[in-house]
Image (spheres, rainbow, N blue to C red):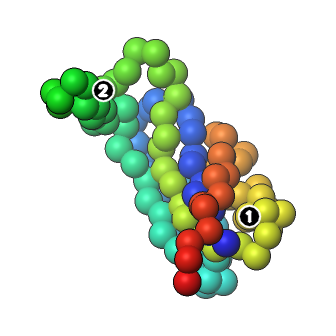
Amino acid sequence: MRYLMLVIEPDVPDRGPTPETETWVAEQDASGARVLGSRLRPGADVRRVTLREGEIVVTDGPFSESKEVISGFDIIEAASPEEALAIAAASPGARNATVEVHPFWPTEP
């Protein structure tokens, strides 16, 4: 089953990947658990898009109500929720930020 891992932390300028993050990514890539992942740009570069009464509304970030931002994501493949949580717990984000683990809905073959 696939899971989306969101790394959430205070909105800070990009520090670049740490050596421990690069190691974790390499390990997950080698094991086949990591399908895709990336760092994300800071809150000032985020845009929100809504459609209200037929009108497209675009709002530029940063958003004052947000103290934290999604700074990165990974899509992982795991045999069980427990395995997905173990992969997330091993990530540097779990020690330095917050990691949310979202299961995907199953898809038809």
Q: Position of residue 58 (x, y in %)?
A: 21, 29
Q: Residue at x 22, y 24 (%)?
A: 53
Q: Position of residue 6 (x, y in %)?
A: 57, 49
Find the residue positioned furthest to the front: 53
Q: Residue at x 16, y 27 (%)?
A: 55
| Gap between marks 1 and 2 measured at Cα | 31 Å
Q: Is residue 31 visible?
A: yes
Q: Residue at x 25, y 31 (%)?
A: 51
Count neighbours of disc 1 (C-alpha within 10 A) and say few if under 14, some if 14 to 19, many if 20 or more: many
Residue type (three-letter) at the residue carrying disc 1:
Ala
Residue identified by numbered label 2: 61
Q: Position of residue 70 (x, y in %)?
A: 49, 40
Find the residue positioned furthest to the top: 64
Q: Is residue 82 left or right of residue 84?
A: right
Residue type (three-letter) at the residue carrying disc 2:
Gly
> Which of the pair 6/94 is nearer the observer?
6
Which SS class for mark 1? helix
Q: Quadrant of the C terminus?
A: bottom right
Q: Is residue 51 left or right of residue 77?
A: left
> Which of the pair 82/67 is nearer the observer?
82
Residue identified by numbered label 1: 84
